[in-house]
Image: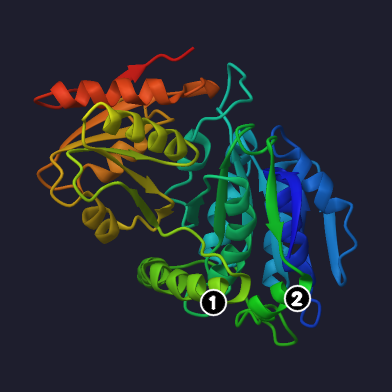
């Protein structure tokens, strides 16, 4: 193991490079790449690497980038790409196709506000737009998790009982361009963790049809199979966590991460880097005598309902923090989890849109507001500038 001072973009590029090299004895590695701020550094780094039996295609659009990944993967090779914001929106047709073809593609998505008007800072709306696309979605809190979850993503995606694409999400600039000491393993350790990919339905010598016409019954069967595969993800992820910890000496995050929940009377629920800020706010609230706790959703698809219910327990007041909006509804995380939390009073706060700096004092004010709140109301947008 070595420690490197790198951005999360470079951490993702390193992890993808090592995952690609780990498949050199099988059918290799490849993908399509296209730049878009703020993920460009990742694919620039990746494109400069010498990967045995590896080939990246520099394409003219994000749609084509995913098309190359689909072709690479259906041929049986390990495949990776990265995108953000409107790039993700542009490749949506092929994002959906990758899941329907049951291809274990891994994509790093740097969360950025969708435009217009144009904004290059963090907002979770781009990846949450794809929540129904059939991809596993993991949300990172720090640079180390970006590296680790890229490796975990390949392990989960390529498991024969899953065979679904995985999106590893990180906050724009808060992670993508911030340099942090990150532990990088040796290639032999990554080789041992990632077995050779053997895609059972890859194109080979025998003629097969890919993407033919389905009649209603066949569609029902295929959608059921995809749903069942998604339901197996938590079990496969848990097994991969154990093996990752044994191999690398650290444990990837649980699907739901709790902080100071044991006696909490108020909980903050969040995605991504907001969770680190929430922990600081919880500590500050505790110093003021308010029993607060935090719940971080690290796995958004499949939604870990049982783990969420266990993390919230009998807490009556829950504030769900969204860095996104669904016009006509509210925050997307809130909309997803409020039905899981039983009798709790679940209030939605939308904060940090367009990259607004969410600080501990902002979340502390929400905790204090929840402390005096007697009932939930419509989602509230909190301005932080």
Is there CB contact under 8 Å for labels 1 and 2? no
Q: Secondary structure at mark 1?
A: helix
Where residue 151 appears, x then y in whole percent? 63, 64
Q: CA distance from mark 1 to mark 2?
A: 18 Å
Q: Earlier in the sequence, mark 1 or mark 2?
A: 2
Where residue 57 appears, x then y in whole percent? 83, 54
Q: Is residue 369 above or below residue 296?
A: above
Residue at image position (84%, 67%) is 54
Does residue 58 appear in this view? Answer: no
Where residue 239 appears, x then y in whole percent? 46, 76
Q: Nearer the viewer, residue 10 or 32?
A: 10
Q: Which quadrant of the view contains residue 271?
A: top left
Where residue 213 appears, x then y in whole percent? 52, 66
Answer with left or right where residue 307 lies relative to residue 249: left
Q: From the image, tell me which residue sits under label 2.
A: 23
Q: Which quadrant of the view contains residue 364?
A: top left
How crowded pointer 2 is (Cα within 10 Å; few <14, some 14-19, many 20+) is rated as many
Q: From the image, tell me which residue sits under label 1.
A: 243
Residue at image position (26%, 53%) is 311
């Amino acid at each position: 193991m070595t420690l490197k001072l790198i951005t999360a973009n470079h951490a993702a590029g390193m992890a993808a490079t090592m995952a690609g090299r780990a498949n050199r004895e099988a059918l290799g590695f490849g993908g399509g790449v296209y730049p878009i701020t703020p993920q460009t550094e990742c694919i620039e780094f990746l494109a400069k690497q010498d990967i045995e039996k590896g080939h990246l295609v520099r394409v003219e659009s994000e749609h084509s980038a995913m098309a190359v990944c689909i072709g690479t993967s259906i041929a049986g090779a390990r495949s990776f790409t990265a995108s953000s914001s409107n790039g993700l929106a542009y490749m949506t047709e092929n994002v959906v196709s990758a899941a329907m073809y049951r291809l274990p593609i891994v994509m790093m998505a740097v969360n950025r506000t969708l435009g217009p008007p144009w904004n290059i800072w963090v907002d979770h709306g781009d990846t949450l737009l794809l929540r129904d696309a059939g991809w596993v979605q993991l949300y990172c809190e720090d640079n180390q998790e970006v590296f680790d979850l890229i490796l975990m993503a390949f392990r989960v995606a390529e498991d024969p009982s899953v065979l679904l694409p995985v999106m590893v999400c990180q906050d724009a600039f808060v992670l993508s361009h911030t340099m942090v000491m990150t532990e990088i393993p040796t290639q032999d350790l990554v080789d041992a963790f990632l077995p050779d990919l053997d895609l059972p339905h890859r194109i080979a010598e025998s003629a097969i049809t890919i993407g033919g016409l389905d009649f209603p019954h066949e569609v029902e069967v295929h959608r059921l199979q995809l749903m069942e595969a998604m339901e197996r993800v938590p079990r496969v992820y848990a097994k991969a966590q154990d093996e990752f910890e044994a191999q690398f000496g650290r444990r990837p995050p649980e699907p739901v991460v709790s902080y100071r929940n044991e006696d909490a009377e108020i909980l903050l629920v969040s995605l991504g880097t907001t969770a680190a800020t929430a922990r600081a706010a919880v500590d500050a609230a505790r110093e003021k005598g308010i029993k607060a706790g935090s719940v971080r959703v690290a796995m958004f698809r499949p939604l870990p309902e049982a783990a969420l219910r266990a993390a919230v327990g009998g807490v009556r007041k829950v504030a769900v923090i969204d860095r996104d909006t669904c016009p006509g509804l509210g925050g997307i995380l809130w909309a997803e989890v409020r039905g899981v939390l039983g009798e709790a009073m679940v209030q939605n706060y939308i904060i940090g849109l367009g990259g607004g700096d969410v600080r501990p004092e902002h979340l502390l004010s929400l905790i204090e507001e929840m402390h005096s709140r007697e009932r939930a109301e419509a989602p509230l947008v909190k301005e932080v500038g």
